[in-house]
Image (cartoon, rainbow, N blue to C red):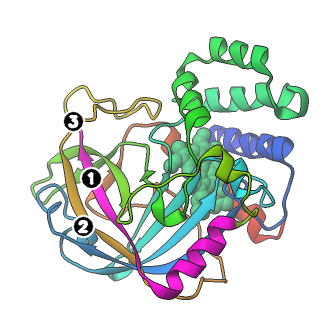
Amino acid sequence: MVENTNETVLATRTVNYIEKLAGTHPGYRRAHAKGVLFQATFTPTGKASHYTKAAHLTRNEVSAIVRFSNSSPNPATADALAAVKGMSVQFQLPEGDIHSLVGITLPIFVTKSPQTFFDMLKTITSFKEGKPDFKEMVKLFATYPESRAAFQMIRKLKHTKSYAKGRYYAVHAFYLINEEGERTPVKFEWEPELGVETFTVKELATLPPDYLEAELAQRLKTEEVRFRLHIVIGEEHDPTDDPTKEWPKERTRIDAGVLSIHAKEMIKDDTFIFDPTILPTGIECSDDEILPFRKDAYAVSYERRRKGQ
Ligand code: HEM
């Protein structure tokens, strides 16, 4: 049961508005509804050991579950219609610890505060068919200027040719904690070993609705798919509480390890929840307010889909 606090009330109302905008699709996630799950393995390089005592980033090879998804809340949305794609990873550490690392093909988010996200969603729901026209979009940016950068990126974002060829960003800042108790602000990114490749608009028009799932299933029959985990080290004044802001490109990056997806079969029994606040010893949430809000919203969505609602 999701507990009834002010925060969970806002999360519940937010999920209700997502349903108002995109419809209710029983049994599906209320966002990133269409997806595929695979078994994987994560092997650390050990290069992050200076910053964290988290076992999977320092010494132990661990099993992982990975879910690739189309960001739309409607599971019938064609892959070519939603440019933002997701990659959720659940590292399974010794002694039952879990690290959920949830990424998208965009480095930033649309709002800094949960209330603004809710207000914006409510405003968009009031537009005709939930799709703002140009004038309404200008008005929206004037009301919520913090969302302008993310929306502009979404507008320009090119569609990935394969789930295996996307770069995925975990967006929020987190803290790594080492054996001495030192805290380092960081961001996580997945870099595809196959390189980033995107479609032209002309190529997109010819694709079947579920091309990403089919392409990945086919690829995994003959080869492993690998992603390198990059940890970006934050410096003084890099915001840790604002997912609408990128950190400077020149920040130090650590190659923390490699995720190998070697499964030939998808996981059919999807009982998973990828809550980005579920972290092992050695990693902590930052002061970003969107993180605990996501915990609540994901719990609401999970409870509904689990009951087949
Ligand atoms: C206001 C903030 C947000 C809200 C209310 C929200 C809402 C949701 C909901 C309700 C789900 C379905 C959860 C489930 O049933 O398990 C979901 C899934 C997802 N969200 Fe968010 N989200 C937010 C921010 C973000 C951000 C910043 C990212 C960027 C990393 C993100 C990436 C994803 C991904 C990749 C999934 C699919 C997870 C999976 O594979 O199970 N979301 N979101």
Circle 2 or circle 1, nearest the eye: 1
Place of residue 278 in the rendered image (x, y in percent of width and height, measured from the top left): 45, 61
The answer to which of marks 2 and 3 sits earlier in the sequence is 2
User: Residue pushed farthest right?
Assistant: 128
Position of 106 compared to 72: left or right?
left
Q: CA distance from mark 2 to mark 1?
A: 10 Å
Depth check: 273 or 11 in front? Answer: 273
Name the secondary structure under disc 2: helix
Specify start and end residues of the magenta stretch as a single range. 211-234
| As drawn, 54 above or below 92 | above
| As drawn, 163 above or below 247 | below
Depth check: 37 or 77 in front? Answer: 77
Q: Residue at x 81, y 60 (%)?
A: 76
- Where, quadrant-wise, is the C terminus in this rendering? bottom right
The answer to which of marks 3 and 1 sits earlier in the sequence is 1
Q: CA distance from mark 3 to mark 1?
A: 13 Å
Contact (Cβ within 8 Å) of mark 2 with mark 1 = yes
Position of 101 compared to 273: left or right?
left
Q: Which residue is mark 2?
A: 57
Looking at the rendering, which quadrant does residue 177 occupy? Answer: bottom left
Looking at the rendering, which quadrant does residue 226 occupy? Answer: bottom left
Q: Label 2 crowding class (10 Å Cα cut-off): few <14, some 14-19, many 20+?
A: many
Name the secondary structure under disc 3: loop
Q: Residue at x 47, y 55 (%)?
A: 197
Q: From where the camera sits, is residue 295 visible? A: no
